[in-house]
Amino acid sequence: MSNNQVWDDEYEVVVVGSGAAALAGAYTAARRGLKTLLVEKTNLLGGASAYSGASCWLPGTQVQQRADVQDSGESAKAYLQAVMGDHEVERREAFVDTAPELVEFFESDPAIEFYWTAFPDYFNAHESKPLGRSMMPVDLPREEIGELADLVRPLVEYDRYNQPHPDGPLTAGQALIGRLLLALTNTGNGTIQLETELVDVISEDGRVTGAIVKNAEGTRRIRATEGVILGAGGFEANQDLRTLNGTPGNSGWTMAPAGANTGTAIRAGQKAGGVVEQLHQAWWCPGAAQPKGNAAFALGFRGGVWLDANGQRFANECLPYDQMGRVLAAAPERIPSWFIFDSRFGGELPGIMRPFNTTPQEHLDAGTWVKADTLDELAAATGLPADALQASIERFNGFTVTGVDEDFHRGENPYDQFFADPAYGPGPTLIPVDQAPFYAARMVLSDLGTKGGLRTDVDARVLREDGTAVEGLYAVGNTSASFSGGFYPGPGTPLGSGMVFAYRAAQTLKA
Ligand code: FAD
């Protein structure tokens, strides 16, 4: 009991959600000796983080040093300055300054290990790294995590089809969530409650002192003596909020787990006095329309061209996915549009699609792809104007001869080349579209989560409009407004920054 409150349970810290940010916060708090409760609304841990490629953009750490990659915090700061100008300097520099400490703290736990992985920074700017500054968790053998593995949400390839992760080690996002879960469990200070949803936070005299959670047993009031960390994702699955906030895309096309992240934690933070910002922003990506009406994250195009409804190219198809998403978001008439490719790729889309287990035939049967022997027939099947389609392909094929994309400069950035296949010669991003039959894949705007939310300070404290902190309340991951605003600087910015700010939040709690 405190003041007039009646509590059903008491912890020092309550963490809401179980993505990488929430688990990083829960683990850090628990390792510091704080009695920590983590509540997750679904029956599985990990959210979109478990679906992810688990690339973590964490510059200048011991992981880069081990791999002999030249990187430093100063270099990363200069890169962010070149990309983002003066946007959110204080938070972004706190992020860069803390990345090495986070990695050292995590890797001092036997459950957590990363390795450097090549993935170029997303902007060809001052101090960008052509092979990047990202890392991934080492695959996690089943025998190390044991039965806890069953609590981790399977990768999107399996989860969307209600299948468990196959036998073998946990990989990518599953490995990240599995390792954080194992580390949290090993502290002995963490309690996890699945199928338990945050409904609201409780405030007393302007300070957040607990959370109201709901599960099959009813509604309970949980006291949090040191703080509540909201890490419940964004609102990508809530179409009403997307519409209200003018967030381009669609709740049915997001890559986050269906129905999971609906913005409840953001709303709770607002009710407690927090202010929100950047609600129109998301971590965008092209989506390949799927037979069931949802979308698959499409990246790494190396062949084909992307045409709008007028049959015109409108961008460098090899752009980093968020930048291509922004091109689509800026002109809604490009959604949907068509990606045209020829048969030299064996009837497969010349890029990567996740989930990757829908076959070309399933797409053709569903009409999300069409196939034709001539470009005229393809125009008829897609509704694209035949003359414009022919002209666009001819012009692009001309660029494949000269080796220069005069319209959109495809192939001129290190990122463009990263996914290219050298088997296609000296200009492997400029490959003609000339081998019948031809294909068209319907494309939409997808996202990896929204990135607007509660405004926070360098320690993830939720801020009021007047800049003061709501004591006892923290927001991390996509529940908070990202420091990166309208930019996606490098592969792993969502996970890297989510974990860093959760770590900083948990380090400020009184132990
Ligand atoms: P999530 O990981 O989605 O976790 C939120 C959790 O909160 C969910 O489990 C949800 O069920 C739970 N929740 C929601 N509401 C409540 C409530 N009221 N009460 C309790 N629990 C609640 N990012 C990178 O940095 N690197 C990558 O390589 C990368 N690859 C990606 C690949 C794919 C296919 C996808 C889908 C995303 C990828 N991303 C990547 C993006 C990144 O995964 C997400 O932006 C990030 O994981 C969001 O983390 P989060 O912790 O905010 O939310």
Image (cartoon, rainbow, N blue to C red):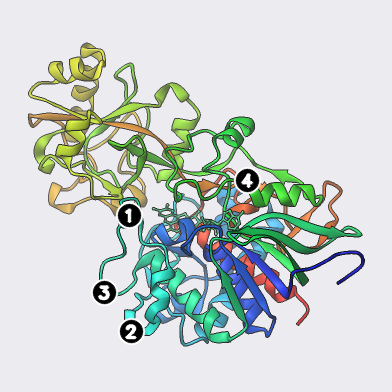
Badge number at residue 162: 1
* Residue at screen point 50% across, 75% down: 180
Residue 383 location, quadrant: top left
Tell me: residue 409, above or below residue 387.
below
Q: Name which quarter of the figure residue 209 lies in.
A: bottom right
Query: Where does label 3 land, which residue?
Result: 168
- Please name the residue shown 55% across and 79% down the image: 184
Q: Residue 262's spot in the image, x, y percent?
A: 57, 45
Q: Does the residue tagged 4 have its C-beta within 8 Å of any atom of ligand 1?
A: no
The residue shown at (20%, 46%) is 428
Q: Nearer the viewer, mark 3 or mark 4?
A: 3
Label 1 vs label 3: CA separation?
18 Å
Could you tell which of marks 2 and 4 lies nearer the N-terminus? 2
How far apart are the alpha carbons under marks 2 and 4? 39 Å
Q: Is residue 366 above or below residue 485?
A: above
Classify mark 4: residues with Cα within 10 Å, few (<14), some (14-19) or many (20+). many
Is any part of residue 473 visible from this angle?
no
Element type where label 4 sits in the image: loop
Q: Closer to us: mark 1 or mark 4? A: 1
Kindly identify which numbered label has been placed on residue 143.
2
CB atoms at circles 2 and 4 under 8 Å apart? no
- Contact, CB < 8 Å: mark 1 with mark 3? no
- Lateral position of residue 153 relative to residue 305, left or right: right
Under tag 2, what secondary structure? helix
> Disc 3 or 4, which lies upstream in sequence?
3
Separation of disc 3 and disc 4 at Cα? 36 Å
